[in-house]
Amino acid sequence: MTLNTGVLYIVATPIGNLSDITDRAKDILNFVGLIAAEDTRHTRRLLQHLDIQTKAISLHDHNERQKAATLVEQLQKGDSIALVSDAGTPLISDPGFFLVREVRAAGIKVVPIPGACAMVAALSASGLATDRFIFEGFLPSKSGARCKQLEQLANEPRTLVFYESTHRIEDCIVDMSKIFGKQRQATIARELTKTFETIHSDTLDNLIQWMQSDSDQKRGEFVVIVAGNPNSLTTDEKESDRIVDLLATKLPLAQATALAADITGERKKALYQRALLRKQ
Ligand code: SAM
């Protein structure tokens, strides 16, 4: 592996299971002169586990602007730096945006070292359409502001992905049910890659009842994935779906969607995923 000097590496770290780190990430964390970490105590535990002795300094939302200039200078001198957050991919609902912008503006190379990301892990196992999605991160903590934001998303046809914490998960699902409708399909991905990993799909209304009947389901870290609004499809998409449904009365679904894709010019994968959701 070629390791360059004067590079800012954006290194993904595990979201639970400590084995979810790549060999390349470990090499980079070993090689760089400095690790800029969201929380040094948290990162030291990971470094200890990996037997890596690299120095770590803190870089979080409150000091990022102040520290960016010094880090840019160090990179310009030829030092390499790794940016990590507490879990998963830095900058994804985590600090680092300001630093990356400054580093790139200074003409310095920024290299991503991909790995775990709760959003991608949850989406990949959600059973909801993955051909088009939007990531909304954390919703506002107050119900009024949260509902307002949800209202703006009510007609969104793409799959919606949110992060949520243990304190608000139930209120959040209740608000989603109010705004998106009780029957909208959703998946709750809890404690991914950890001992109590749970990935549960149902209508929003049933998910509320499920959580209320088992308080353990409100513990931990969550990704909430909500199906897009099926009624917001364009006229062309609705027509494509009608063709798929017609063909599917005579053919297996994979064949029906392949043929419908040829007829309509729409992507087969999108047609197939929507057809599966209609079946649900
Ligand atoms: N940068 C991280 C990533 O790549 O996913 C996300 C950081 S954000 C501050 C933390 C939020 O991500 C949590 O509140 C939760 O919504 C989600 N999350 C992180 N780890 C998770 C896990 N193991 N299971 C489910 N959700 C998780």
Image (cartoon, rainbow, N blue to C red):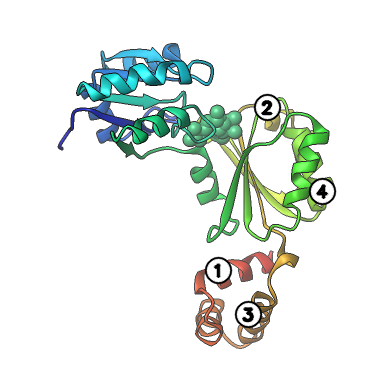
Q: Which mark is residue 166?
A: 2
The residue pinned by badge 1 equals 270
Query: Disc 3 and disc 4: Cα gap in Å?
Result: 28 Å
For marks 1 and 3 on the same chain, the one whose residue lies earlier in the sequence: 3
- Given contact means CB atoms under 8 Å apart, are the residues at marks 1 and 3 in contact? no
Query: Disc 4 and disc 2: Cα gap in Å?
Result: 21 Å
Place residue 85 in its image quadrant. Answer: top left
Residue type highlighted by circle 1 = Ala
Place residue 4 in its image quadrant. Answer: top left
Looking at the image, residue 7 lies above or below residue 185: above
The residue pinned by badge 3 equals 240
For marks 4 and 1 on the same chain, the one whose residue lies earlier in the sequence: 4
Q: Residue at x 69, y 76 (%)?
A: 238
Structural crowding at the residue carrying mark 2, measured as other residues with C-alpha within 10 Å and reported as few (<14), some (14–19) or many (≥20)? few
Q: Secondary structure at mark 3?
A: helix
The residue pinned by badge 4 equals 179
Q: Secondary structure at mark 4?
A: helix
Quarter of the picture holding the N terminus: top left
Looking at the image, residue 243 lies above or below residue 27: below
Q: Secondary structure at mark 2?
A: loop
Query: Disc 4 and disc 1: Cα gap in Å?
Result: 25 Å
- Given contact means CB atoms under 8 Å apart, are the residues at marks 3 and 2 in contact? no
- Given contact means CB atoms under 8 Å apart, are the residues at marks 3 and 4 in contact? no
In front: mark 4 or mark 2? 4
Residue 209: tell me if it is visible. Answer: no
